[in-house]
Amino acid sequence: MEQIRSAFRTYGYFSSDGLEYIITDPRTPAPWVNVISNGDYGLVISQAGSGYSFLTHASLNRITRWEQDLIRDEWGKYLYIRDLETGLTWSAGYQPAGRDLEDYRVRHGLGYTVLEARRAGIAHSLTVFVPGHDPCELWILRLENKGSQRRRLQVVSYFEWLLGAAPDWHREFHKLFIETWYRADAGLLLATKHLWELPAGDEIGWNRSWPYVAFHTASPAPSSFEGDKRAFLGRHGRLEAPQSLTAPQASNTQGRFGDAIGSLRVEVTLDPGESKEVVFVLGAARNEEQALSLGRKYQDVTRAHEALRQVQRFWRELVGSLTVKTPDEALNRMVPWLIYQAVSGRLFARTAYYQTGGAYGFRDQLQDSLIWLLLGRPERTLEQIKLHAAHQYREGIVLHWWHPLAETGSKSDYSDDLLWLPFALLYYLRETGDFAALEERVPYYDGGAGTLKEHALKAFEVALSRRSPRGLPLILGADWNDGLNAVGKKGRGESVWMAHFLYFLLTGWSELPVLDAATRERFQTEAQSLKAATNLHAWDGEWYWRATTDSGRVLGSRNSPEGKIFLNAQTWAVLSGLAPLERARTALASARKYLYQPYGPLLLAPAYTRPDPEIGYLTRYAPGLRENGGVYVHAACWAVLAERKVNGVGSAYELWKSFCPAHRGQDADAYQAEPYVMPGNVDGPLSPTPGRAGWTWYTGSAAWNLRAIVEGLLGLEATLEGLKLEAQLPEDWDGYRVIRRYRGTTYQIRVRRAEPGEARGLWVNGKPWDNPVLPQAIGEVLSVEALV
Ligand code: GLC
């Protein structure tokens, strides 16, 4: 960020409007990527120009081959530029032949990435993006002759086809099923695969074709093409200097007998000062006809630019639906990127560089989809809720995750999964007051249908029935913390966090005006008994335990040599209201003492140093990594919300800043990951690199961080009664502004510190308003001023 200068080595900065992150040195400590998707087709691209593409499912339907190698970062879809006079060849990006590029700049934007550089008197910029509604990606390469000689250039694309499930472990086997063919009339290289390993559970097994036709085309029309890797690279050839580029023509190989790649050659002549654009298209269509028509559509450069403008407009409008302006520039910068990360990365693409996914996690996308509520688009959250409800069995249990395309998944034995359905509904209802939604009928995964309310009540029934003799919830396969997967395998281990979570939901739901009296009373009684049991059994003196194992061992107690204290068991005791005030304070004070690091709050401490088969795979990570005592950002955001509740905005803000990428990323060599998106986790104190971030673009972290900002820092919370504003200012803030839409009203909120002698309070459209719940005026803009 320009305003935040630092003494550390920098690799980039935010553009002045904050909507681009500009990388000036490609040798970033880790891949700094963009995840671009229109909700169906998508791609991941790094600052070096590497990455992969997919349709609908990033693992089951990968279009191009890629290897997850963060160090070499050398698999991708590349463009070479070759000077036909001198033979000098380089690439448009740093990989695979761009080491000597001058003025290299990568601009990651919302929905697009631009790689810019110069070499040998040619300035070039490559814009990569996915049109809003078509299953393809476009690469617009602009070339400009900066010299005084006429230049004859050749532009050559290159990538490997994968066409199906990734990785294709046995590639010598899988390559035998790929077929490529060329349509000279349309300048279109096509490819399909006669085998698709789709885990659809329908017994078809290895007897199914990949039901798409992938295509690659360019404009101007290609002069020759290559469909075989060996012909392109040469035996023992290197991507840095492919052998075929030295030949006047590519070999025009197609068919079924090669090692399938896609490569097109295009010639461009540039007079001094002249610039031209070349467009490449790559996509996956339903059939050859659609491939031809999409190819033709985007061979038109004007069309390609129009598609780019549309994409940019879409994202700008979306991130503009929530405006936040505070004295903290890093915070302001993060807001649009958090929205973009949650929507493009987690809801649309569901994949990234660290974790390549494509499936839906039952709890994951439900939580991520809460982002729409903050953007005035609650109908998108409801859509997500319905999608997940349709992956619930009649008995109430849900799929832990499932694959789109295959529609298969794993039936969950996690104790918490099913409860995220009533959780998301509760947030939806607080946002909208749309209780009619509860009457919408949604099918069950194993047949039949029920209203959303019935779906939710079934989840409660199952959760309430899974209790230990002393009334605490059983943890079973695990709870939110996937890594605790052995704690309750035998059905006896308990989860204290689940007690908090269930208590939160029971009390929240019992306030809804839609429960019959008997259910409401039952929920209240159950909530009270959970509260009593937890406070009686699971309070350790200074904090709450986290769980007990099947054999009765306590996790997260002063008597535990490792895993003494866990963050979620303290933060959720507060967030749920289960902890009496004194305990809430003590629990957070203990979290502060044992867990808060300068780079964020740890998920637990001390980390486990040896695998513990009674606890689960969490203990198998090196100490300090991921759930084993790193900062798990998803959970760190909950700590911000809990701090706000108990200790006010000052503590919440300090904690929030401690793991804010735009702050921490100023020391990029230590932090390593992208400074513009949330990481999944940050290494803890037992790692040799505490504070190093990884698993960026990960689920949970962005949507929750935005909520931590809006509720935890800005004090703006949706309640059943309306939008509540409880403004407080961190010491070094003089005020802030927010524009937030809620139930059809647009609130323009300005908070500032009262001058000495000035009255404090709340004004709506200039008139005093003495209720923290703001009035509503559908279709109108209300101007709210708070003096604190
Ligand atoms: C991963 C999972 C998420 C889980 C978390 C903690 O983020 O996707 O569902 O809650 O890890 O284990």
Image: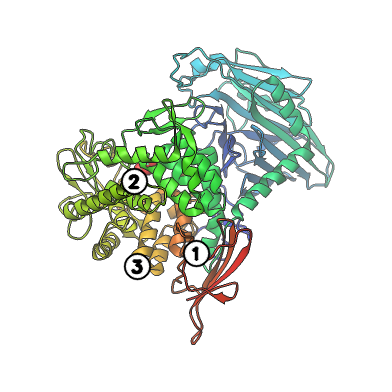
Return the disc, 3 or 1, that comes first in the chain's sequence: 1
Percent from the top left, x then y, of residue 527?
A: 27, 51
Identified by mark 3, the residue type is Asn
- Residue 321 visible, this angle: yes
Label 1: which residue? 7
Label 3: which residue? 647
Task: Tell me, yes or no, whether the two marked residues, 2 and 1, touch with CB atoms within 8 Å.
Answer: no
Which quarter of the frame holds ligand 1?
top left
Q: Quadrant of residue 61?
A: top right
Task: Tell me, yes or no, whether the two marked residues, 3 and 1, touch with CB atoms within 8 Å.
Answer: no
Identified by mark 1, the residue type is Ala
Percent from the top left, x then y, of residue 710?
A: 48, 60
Identified by mark 2, the residue type is Leu
Q: Residues within 10 Å of mark 2 (few under 14, many from 20)?
A: many
Label 2: which residue? 625
Viewer-proximal residue, 292 or 182?
292
On screen, residue 91 above or below 739: above
